[in-house]
Amino acid sequence: MNVPASTKRLVLSLYRDLLRYGGQLQYTDQEYFLNRIRREFRQSASLTDPKEIEFCYKLKALSSLPWRSLSKVIDHSLVPVLREEDLEEMFVRGSGPGGQAVAKTNNKVVLTHKPTGIVVQCHTTRSLFENRREARKQLLGKLDQLYNGDQSVEAQLQRIEAKKQTETARRKQKLQAKKKAWKEREFGNESDKSSEK
């Protein structure tokens, strides 16, 4: 199989970077890490069939996925898209703490969504750019809640958090029951003996 020179350079660069990174490790055995990197590169170098290379790549990518978080995937497919022509944006003077830097600059963003009439005001920072970005995020969240209701990103996050809290409460209750049973088993007999005397 003919491998392009640019790919070879990228692979060698990756190899050098990994070896350099291995030299900086503090909590992992450096010798083990370096030997493993060398072994993996030697094994991958013998692959010639494009299907094998693709399979090997997918296998590596699959093994590096955080499996625990896959159960909590949030569906962003229903989130509405903000179109700039549907927005009316005004910059007004802010208020609150900050003195002259706030009172004399127009860095508060008032964003209006024309089709729905939803208005969002944002003055979280002194930066106009960051306030514009934050106002759009807030407006997108409100539109998502309006259009998708129970399937909005915020509702999905709340469901995940509620599920997590009920699971934590269940585990806590189970642990308390085990502790109570242990105390009764260990100390219950002593209190019975002391009452008999």
Image (cartoon, grey):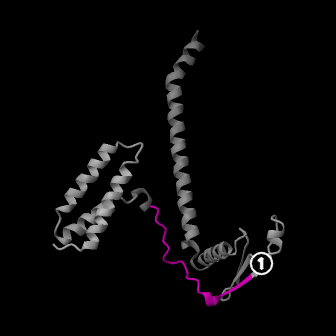
Report if residue 86 lies within the magenta region. yes
Point 30% across, 44% down: residue = 32
Report if residue 185 lies within the magenta region. no
Task: Determine the main secondary structure of the stretch shown in magenta.
Answer: loop
Identify the amino acid type marked 1: Asn
Counting from the top left corner in percent of width and height, residue 96 is at 82, 67
Counting from the top left corner in percent of width and height, residue 173 is at 54, 42
Quadrant assignment, res 12 = bottom left
Using the image, determine if residue 31 lies above or below residue 49: above
Point 70% across, 75% down: residue = 128
Quadrant assignment, res 11 = bottom left
Compare residues 185 and 60 and report the one nearer the observer.
Answer: 60
Counting from the top left corner in percent of width and height, residue 187 is at 54, 21
Point 24% across, 66% down: residue = 55
Where the N terminus falls, by quadrant? bottom left
Counting from the top left corner in percent of width and height, residue 19 is at 33, 53
Residue tagged 1: 106
Using the image, determine if residue 153 lies above or below residue 163: below
What span is in magenta?
A: 71-90
Q: Residue furthest top?
A: 197
Compare residues 135 and 143 and report the one nearer the observer.
Answer: 135
